[in-house]
Amino acid sequence: MKNISAGGAMERLKKLIPAGVQPKFSTADEWRKWQTEEGLKRAAEVDKLNQTARAEKILGRSGIQSLHQNCTFKNYEVKNDGQRHALSLAKSYAMNFGNGFTSFVFSGSPGTGKNHLAAAIGNYLLARDSTVLIVTVADLMLRVRACYDGGQSEASLLDELCRVDLLVLDEVGIQKDSKHEKIIINQIIDRRLASMRPVGILTNLNFDELAATLGERVVDRLKMDSGMWVNFAWESYRNKVTHLRLVK
């Protein structure tokens, strides 16, 4: 009965197709296959929309702060070989995202371009329908405390953070004496890496300082599977701009 019904519907559909228009299917089996494929596509689209909505719900905003929403690889200023190397690595990371999973650490002083390149990666991925969240540790801890105040589960927040395609934690290590902060960061990194989800770390700390802050085990896990460490070892661009203004 199903074949007769599908075949009859197919014949009626052919009569409705304007002359000269080539249908995507010519048999009932091809029609059913097309319907299945379209259903799967729609389900994937809905799932991606749900992921984006969950990513925005985590902090009540979109994945990248407005300050960095226009950051791209093209408008990243290159003044030295180190910046050129960092740009090349960041572009390669973005373009190969999803081929395996690789975490990254951008280490260097404030104003050296870590946030710009991290945001450029994020904006590149967002334009290709990936979910991205870049958040400072301070904002994250405020959200954790809001869970307690609202009677929500910290575990549910961590679960949502683990569903984002790319999570970038900014200003890691600034509050070095916060034991709770260290526990939360460790839990996030552990859960994401266990579920094969990459983590980006933006920090002013060098390797030894970050290992002392987060623990060697966590840093070792970040290095696994060809994890990328990039040193932003040049002078702060902000300091140069401030100096020029003072000179003027």
Image (cartoon, grey):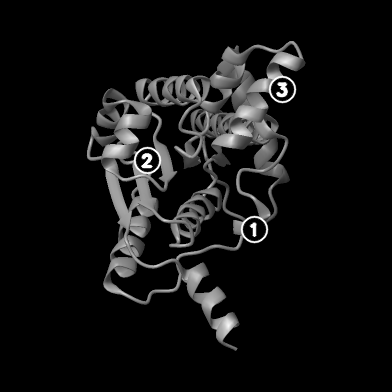
Which residue is located at x 59 percent, y 36 percent?
138
Which residue is located at x 61 percent, y 24 percent?
6
Quadrant of the image containing the N terminus:
top right
* Image quadrant in which you'd find residue 63: top right
Distance between the Cα atoms at labels 2 and 1?
26 Å
Q: Is residue 138 found left or right of 195 in the rendered image? A: right
Please tell me which of labels 3 and 2 falls first in the chain.
2
Tell which of 220 and 26 is nearer to you: 220
Q: Is residue 26 found left or right of 85 in the rendered image? A: right
Where does residue 83 sit, x and y in percent of width and height?
34, 67
* Mark drawn on residue 67: 1
Which residue, given by chain and number where applicable, does mark 3 sit on? Answer: 146
Tell which of 81 and 207 is nearer to you: 207
* Mark drawn on residue 98: 2
Q: Is residue 11 found left or right of 77 in the rendered image? A: right
In the depicted structure, whether residue 128 falls above or below residue 246: above
